[in-house]
Every structure is written in C-alpha cells, then in structure tokens.
Image (spheres, rainbow, N blue to C red):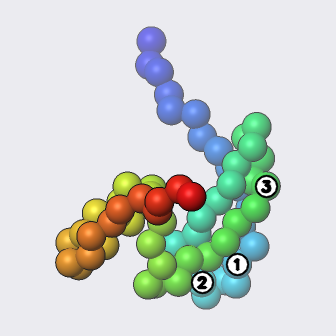
Amino acid sequence: MHSQIPMLNVDLHVSPDFSGRIMLYVENGLVISEMPLMPDEIIGTPSLFNQLLERAGYHVTPAEKG
C-alpha cells in the first residue's frame, strides 16, 4: 500500500508572467487569501525577529509595566 501526500489544487490570481513568492491563507482546504511577497520581505516568528535584531547588535528587552 502506498501512502500519498494530500494535494491542494489552487487557483492563484497573479499575472501570467509573475515570478516570486506568494503567501497563502488556507482554511478547510480552500485558499481564503493570497499575497505576493516582495523580494525583501521576511516572514517569521517574533523569536526570529529578536534573533535578527540581536545579531545586528541590538539588545531586546521587554517593556516595563507601569
């Protein structure tokens, strides 16, 4: 018996000459929204952005409550 990876067939609303990355929001197997990403855009967790800032020499600390 062969297990197959489920496939999601989607229609993207981009021009025929589009090349690049697209962020999709999928709900119950349907694409709810899509957004082409610019070459300089980064998608990541808050932890990733903290790491990027720290590598750039910044010190990240939580704001004081008050």
Q: How many neighbours does mark 3 have within 10 angstroms: few (below 14), some (14-19), or many (20 or more)?
A: few
* Amino acid type indicated by mark 1: Val
Label 1 with label 2: CB-CB less than 8 Å: yes
Say which element carries label 3: strand
Q: Which residue is mark 3?
A: 32
In this image, 19 relative to 59: left or right? right
Q: How many neighbours does mark 1 have within 10 angstroms: few (below 14), some (14-19), or many (20 or more)?
A: few
Image quadrant occupied by the C terminus:
bottom right
Q: Which residue is mark 1?
A: 14
Per the model, the C-alpha gap separating discs 3 and 2 is 20 Å
Image quadrant occupied by the N terminus:
top left
Q: Quadrant of residue 2?
A: top left
Say which element carries label 1: loop
Above or below residue 21? Residue 19 is: below
* Amino acid type indicated by mark 3: Ile
Task: Give the image location of residue 42, x and y in percent.
Answer: 44, 72
What residue appears at the point 51 percent right and 32 percent down from the top-left corner?
5
Camera-nearest residue between 8 and 1? 8
Per the model, the C-alpha gap separating discs 3 and 1 is 15 Å
Q: Which residue is mark 2?
A: 18
